[in-house]
Amino acid sequence: MRQSGRSRHQKRARAQAQLRNLEAYAAQPHSFVFARGHAGRGVRQLSLDLRRVMEPLTATRLQKLMRLPGGPTLTFQINKYTLVRDVVSSLRRHRMHEQQFTHPPLLVLNSFGPQGMHVKLMATMFQNLFPSINVHKVNLNTIKRCLLINYNPDSQELDFRHYSIKVVPVGASRGMKKLLQEKFPNMSRLQDISELLATGAGLSESEAEPDGEHNITELPQAIAGRGNMRAQQSAIRLTEIGPRMTLQLIKIQEGIGEGNVLFHSFVHKTEEELQAILAAKEEKLRLKAQRQDQQAQNVQRKQEQRESHKKKSLAGMKRARADEDSDAEDPGLPPEAEGASQQEEEDEAEYFRQAVGEEPDEDMFPKAQRRRPTRPPSKKHRVKEWKLDRGGDRRPPKAKGRPWGAQAKLGPQVAAQDSGRGQAQPPKSKRVA
């Protein structure tokens, strides 16, 4: 059955949407998280927890490393850390599920002011680890987690915190909030539902967390959840899910861990040393540009040589083809004339044999057939002729005690003597001396 035009348009639209999603995914920043050198069990688990924070735009099962052409490299020291399992075990109720890790977290940077170029570079590095957000087009349903990085100018340390986000409506009683939740409360001890809505009977104080101006906002769009409607007041609640770290910047290097040191927390250089480093860097860049120009010239020169050689080869092939056409061989005589000429030479060769009595030389009559020289009959042929003279192809009787080959060599007389051995003969007399 022929498909309708609507289904074809739907398939085309779906394919175009998938293509746009792939292009958008490839344009987003990706990251690798791995432990360098010999690391203990806690550090390995911390790297796995940090990889979990960076999902989904990170390699969950890193198998291969590659050399990246960019940079710079920022080296941090981990002063304190707490794993995910330790953070979750300390909470009374935690909210962490797989749907929260289908989208990258919301990055929040705090206190990254104008303290120096190294602080600005740190802020830029953290921002480039996650995709940028357009506040006018962002879908709030995709924001399920929050990553907070706070910089302390006094201690020059970074506080790394990871939270899950929950949005709940405000302005309702605890009983109404309970009704709006997925789990319906137990009302077996109540006479009427008004008791639940008015007094919140049977509910613990921990289920009604206090909200204030610090976390209440008006939603610009509807969010998944009961009661989270557009232009309504809702509370944003954060629950820490780990890991937790305290970092300190050590140094900043150019390239991937092998360039010049741009900043160091413990080693400070003078102005003259910095100028010398910059001069060396400029000289290195100049030499690199010079080598690139030289390579480009070499490539251009080799390309021109190949083109010239190609043109010469084509011209030579044309000349050779023209010479072959001019020096074409004579097709020769037709087969009938060729056969007549061969017969004439054979007649002349036969006349030469009869007149001279010898075979002519090969170059005298090249088209005449050569006769095989006559040879005396061999021993085998002589024996065969003798057998024919004796009466056909019958073999003579085999002598006793003597092989057939020896009998054939002795001749007819000996064969006749051997044939008479079966008759009785008189005994020979012995001679007495």
Image (cartoon, grey):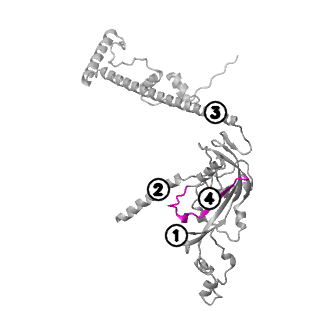
Q: Which residue is mark 1?
A: 222
Mark closer to the observer (1, 2): 1
- The image quadrant that residue 227 belongs to is bottom right
The amino acid pointed to by label 2 is Arg
Horizontal side, residue 62 vs residue 133: left or right: right
Is the C-beta separation of discs 2 and 4 under 8 Å? no
Badge 2: how crowded within 10 Å, few (<14), some, or many (20+)? few
Q: Secondary structure at mark 4?
A: strand
Pick whichever of labels 1 and 2 is earlier in the sequence. Answer: 2
Q: Which residue is mark 2?
A: 20
Badge 1: how crowded within 10 Å, few (<14), some, or many (20+)? some
Pick whichever of labels 3 and 4 is earlier in the sequence. Answer: 4
The residue under the point 53% across, 22% down is 410
Badge 4: how crowded within 10 Å, few (<14), some, or many (20+)? few
Answer whether residue 52 is visible to the viewer in this image: no
User: Residue 306 location, x and y as percent?
Assistant: 45, 28
3D distance between C-alphas at marks 1 and 2: 25 Å
3D distance between C-alphas at marks 4 and 1: 22 Å
Horizontal side, residue 339 vs residue 279: left or right: left
Pick whichever of labels 3 and 1 is earlier in the sequence. Answer: 1
Badge 3: how crowded within 10 Å, few (<14), some, or many (20+)? few
The amino acid pointed to by label 3 is Ala
Q: Which residue is mark 4?
A: 108
The magenta segment: 132-155
